[in-house]
Amino acid sequence: MLMICTPHISLQCMSARLTGNFDSKPHLAAYVQSTTDTLLYDDAPEELQVNSLCDKVSLYQGDITQLEVDAIVNAANSSLLGGGGVDGCIHRASGPCLFAECRSLGGCSTGQAKITCGYELPAKYVIHTVGPIARGHLNENHKMDLANCYQSSLKLAKEFDLRSIAFPCISTGIYGFPNEPAAAIALNNVKEWLKKNHNEIDRVIFCVFLDVDFKIYKKEMTNVFLKDDDNKDEDDIEDDDGQKEDEQMNEVMGKMEQKPKSPPMKKYRAKKSENSHDDQEEKDTLSSEDMKDLNQTTEDQIPSPKTPEDKTDLSEENFPDEPKEINDTENEERITERKGSKVGQEDLKENEDTDETDVTMESQGQDDINRESTLNSPVDEVKDPVNINQMTDEEIDLCQETSPEVASYDVEMCSQNITESSGGNEKTAITED
Ligand SMILES: NC(=O)c1ccc[n+]([C@H]2O[C@H](COP(=O)([O-])OP(=O)(O)OC[C@H]3O[C@@H](n4cnc5c(N)ncnc54)[C@H](O)[C@@H]3O)[C@@H](O)[C@H]2O)c1
């Protein structure tokens, strides 16, 4: 059943139909999975008879930080240190521990993805990916980079046994990727991945924020997924048969052991060492490109306590192609608010000497920000991010309490590194600027 959840139906009544592997946290709106009836919206078309591939996808319009899924994807920038738009919302909603963990990841290249815990978010994990900066016009590299964002994020979801994932419209905001081609790339890449990994995930949610994206996805989703019914070719039929066998097998296996929903980081580590030969087999079949990605993602994903010299210098010169901050009136308020916190000062300093932003992108970014704020996006409720260096031991303990997944992750060690680095390179980097 192709699900299209719209704001007309309150999430509360929808969550009443919530089924499947989702923890029901009463205070959190949850995304809807209606298993029986057609879901839908006022001018709902006939019930959409679609093949099983579409049982896995949903369209949701709203704030991604509200979704109670295994992972939400963040449209981040290459520093992974937060910013505005969906990136800013996710960082604000998840709390200071997300910032601390991102800081230990050493940035992320365009088209790649890295995973962190979700901390105070209803989602268990955040997959940070960096989309291409298209500035309103497209070339083949932009399209490939955007496709890689979806592929890398889904690859991480599979590695971490995540069963549900929500994507925002990556790169279509301040990065200026045109909305329609971006939607087509998102839908087609998710479809191709689902064809090969049908049993690896229960739900992929396309979380749109703006009406323009909702209209595009509503139209495109039926085209991209319904098309399968008409021109199913031999391979697909074979795939489906193969998948049917897998499904039966999984059903039997499923009865024998309850699959863990999504193991916390620590378990993942144990699993990795036990079945390293499996990983090796998988690596043997992966292409060299995938190998690079896989190594890059798996080794980097598990934050291990870093010695001071390990730190990657996150100052601006290491991320030259990052578009500069947009300073419009709303942002100015936000910026003044953030000036109070040390983090705000650091980030602002890093961004202060920014060169001219691209006019198209700026106006697009500006429109996005204005539109976002008119949509009462959570961006309006800006909370000052607490600076990890100023966190007391109790706060750090609280971080670890709120997210069992990070029990083994030493926030203290990380904050110690940060204190040292802010005493060392970062200060130098800033004065050099
Ligand atoms: N530096 C800034 O002032 C600034 C401002 C906006 C965005 N950003 C962000 O811009 C870069 C990434 O650009 P991008 O176009 O990939 O991302 P983006 O600018 O956040 O836009 C991506 C999409 O997400 C949508 N969106 C915004 N808030 C939410 C939400 N709460 N839930 C769901 N969807 C939402 C937004 O409407 C757009 O369709 C990063 O640097 C990131 O920090 C920075």
Image (cartoon, rainbow, N blue to C red):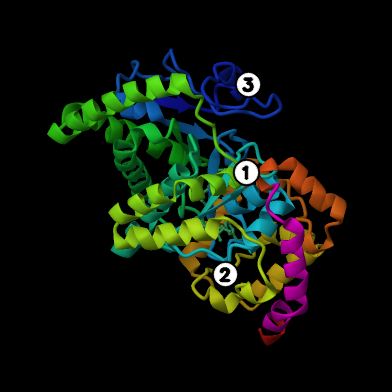
Q: Is residue 242 left or right of residue 428?
A: left
Q: Reading the chain from its start, which is encountered first: label 2 or label 3?
A: 3
Q: What amino acid is found at the position of numbered circle 1 in the picture? A: Thr
Residue extending farthest to the top is 37
Badge 3 element: helix
> Residue at the location (33% across, 16% down)?
46
Range of residues picked out in magenta:
407-429
The mark found on residue 374 in the picture is 1
CA–CA distance in space, label 1 to label 2:
23 Å
Q: Compared with residue 404, is residue 176 higher up or lower down, i.e. above or below?
A: below
Q: How many marks?
A: 3
Q: Is residue 45 left or right of residue 86?
A: left
Badge 1 element: helix
Foreground mark, 1 or 2? 2
Give the residue at mark 2: 324
Asked if marks 1 and 2 touch (Cβ < 8 Å), the reply is no
* Any part of residue 33 in sight: yes
> Residue at the location (37% across, 32% down)?
199
Residue 427 point in image, percent of width and height: 74, 80
Crowding at mark 3 (Cα within 10 Å: few <14, some 14-19, many 20+):
some
Q: Nearer the viewer, residue 108 or 401?
A: 401
